[in-house]
Image (cartoon, rainbow, N blue to C red):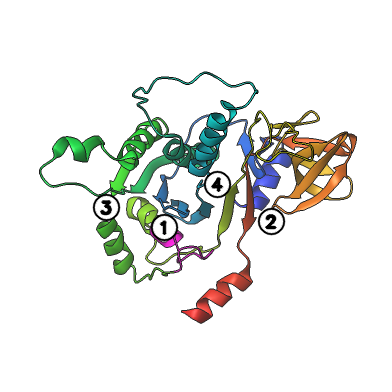
Amino acid sequence: MPCHPARARELVRRGRALRRFNRGAFYIRLLDRSDGEIQPVSVGIDPGSKKEGYTVKSQARTYLNINVDAVTWVKDHIKTRRQMRRARRYRKTPCRPNRRNRARGGLSPSTKARWQWKLRICRWLAKMFPISRFVVEDIKAVTKAGKRRWNSSFSPLEVGKRWFYTELEKLAPVETKQGYETKELRDSAGLKKTSRKLAEVFEAHCVDSWVLANWYVGGHVRPDNTRLLCMTPLRFHRRQLHKLQPEVGGIRKPYGGTRSLGFKRGSLVKHAKLGLVYVGGFQKDRISLHSVTTGKRLTQTAKPSDCQFLAFNSWRIRWATAERREAHSSQM
């Protein structure tokens, strides 16, 4: 169960717990307690097309509110890859032979990437919290009257969410709520949702995830914690045959990859001068380092020997600033 930071330090000092880090998050692992009473902890999930909300809550307090950026670039990437593959068939360059049309089946790449991103976050939370229930706002695609087969399987959205619910059940039981039920819970608590869906504020998405989590565990009438943790997935460019545009002289150089001089891209490292950063690309014998909060590239000439590896990572996180919250409050 979560505890106060002072209590965590005391447990580590007495040798009753071990310090642990998981992708930038610090937690402790007890050594002398294998059972005991724990409070029910629920996770409310508000899916969205551009941003999403997650709330981790027990009856006593709200532990975490997360505003997450959705994965939106896979569809365009698949389209570009298909165009470049077809173009290579008309040039003297390695390419696979054309295949016959066939029923692919399964989830489309863009849909699968979206729901896999949600599942990764839930698995990350399940490693740090004793989650007893996931409460998800159920989303539905447009259906057709009188066509049961069409309504059950035609939409990638429907297929993707069913796959997500099946995988989520392996972590903890799943409860679903319709959109109008979420609105009723929000109205009963006297909470309002902003129309600015892309704003990094509690009222954008986490207000819904909070009422969903509070519906299961109870304990509060109004939110006791509105601090917001913003999370953005890192976009990795997988190894390609060559760049999309040729260089001078018509030469197309190799492009992409997930390794940079021994480091996996996105890994958290500690640099002698820049502090905590994550690894980007490389050129010759130097690597680029990026800010863990903004993603801005800080240098392109860092030596691998000056970087101390800390942890593998596939996203960047930051706390929403108070200035943004105050600016939003003044606009409402």
Residue furthest to the left in view is 146
Give the distance between the C-alpha atoms of the residues marked 2 and 1, in whole angstroms.
Answer: 26 Å
Q: Is residue 152 above or below residue 88?
A: below
Residue depicted at x 51% and y 77% = 329
Q: Earlier in the sequence, mark 4 or mark 2?
A: 4
Whether residue 204 is in magenta: the answer is yes
Give the distance between the C-alpha atoms of the residues marked 3 and 1, in whole angstroms.
Answer: 15 Å
Q: Is residue 309 above or below residue 214?
A: above
Q: Nearer the viewer, mark 1 or mark 4?
A: 1
Q: Tag on residue 210?
A: 1
Q: Is residue 24 left or right of residue 68?
A: right
Residue depicted at x 63% and y 38% = 236
- How many circles with numbers are drawn on the protein? 4
Question: Where residue 202 sits in the image (x, y, percent)?
Answer: 49, 64
Q: Earlier in the sequence, mark 3 or mark 2?
A: 3
Give the distance between the C-alpha atoms of the residues marked 3 and 4, in whole angstroms.
Answer: 30 Å
Give the distance between the C-alpha atoms of the residues marked 4 and 2, in whole angstroms.
Answer: 28 Å
Q: Amino acid at mark 4?
A: Pro
Q: Earlier in the sequence, mark 3 or mark 4?
A: 4
Q: Is residue 126 visible?
A: no
Magenta span of residues: 196-208
Question: Where residue 36 sits in the image (x, y, percent)?
Answer: 47, 35
Whether residue 316 is in magenta: the answer is no
Instruction: Look at mark 4 in the image and give the residue it sits on.
Output: 2
Q: Tag on residue 294?
A: 2
Question: Where residue 226 sits in the image (x, y, percent)?
Answer: 51, 64
